[in-house]
Image: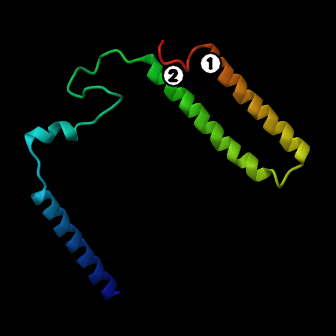
Amino acid sequence: MISLLLMSIIIIIISNILMMLSFMLSKKSLKDREKCSPFECGFDPKSSARIPFSLHFFLITVIFLIFDVEIALIFPMIYTFKMTNLIIWAKTSFFFIIMLLIGLYHEWNQNMLNWTN
């Protein structure tokens, strides 16, 4: 018990010494202030926050999230292939893939995938 307490104290002391050394030795200047500022979607953090946002960025993000969730749903389909009846699995998989293709066709038809709009 005492050795555990002693090791914990030593670890805390060493980590504090290292943090203090890195803070004292780091080179921070006023010129590096731009590097430390947050960068979000090409916005300048020093300008006004009330500038218009391109809706196309939002649409691309929504499409990415939809396809990301679809991939998360396709992986279990591969795993369940061995456990279920082949006909039921094929019908479910075919229906799911058809829904994805219809959604992709709709996005393509609405010109959501064209960046030049």
Amino acid type at image mark 1:
Trp
Number of on-image labels: 2
**Frontmost residue, 19 versus 9:** 19
Query: Mark 2 is on which residue type?
Result: Leu
The location of residue 41, given as percent across then percent down, is 36, 28
Image quadrant in which the N terminus is located: bottom left
Question: Residue at left 27%, top 21%?
Answer: 49
Mark 1 neighbour density, 10 Å: few (under 14) some (14–19) many (20 or more): few
Q: Is residue 21 above or below residue 109?
A: below
State which tag comes first along the sequence, 2 or 1.
2
Q: Secondary structure at mark 1?
A: helix
Figure quadrant of residue 30:
top left
Q: Residue at x 62, y 19 (%)?
A: 107
Residue 93 in the image, given as x and y percentages of width and height: 79, 38
Q: Position of residue 80 (x, y in %)?
A: 78, 51
- Label 2: how many residues lie within 10 Å, few (<14), some (14-19) or many (20+)? some
Marks 2/1: CA–CA distance: 12 Å
In this image, 78 relative to 28: left or right? right
Asked if residue 90 lies left or right of residue 27, the reply is right
Residue 65: x %, y % from top left: 55, 33
Of labels 2 and 1, the one closer to you: 1
Q: Is residue 11 above or below residue 47?
A: below
Task: Kindly identify the residue that appears in the image at 70 percent across and 29 percent down.
Answer: 100
Q: State whether residue 11 is above or below residue 40.
A: below
> CB under 8 Å between callouts 2 and 1?
no
Q: Circle 1 is placed at which residue position?
A: 108
Q: Which residue is mark 2?
A: 59
Res. 53 image quadrant: top left
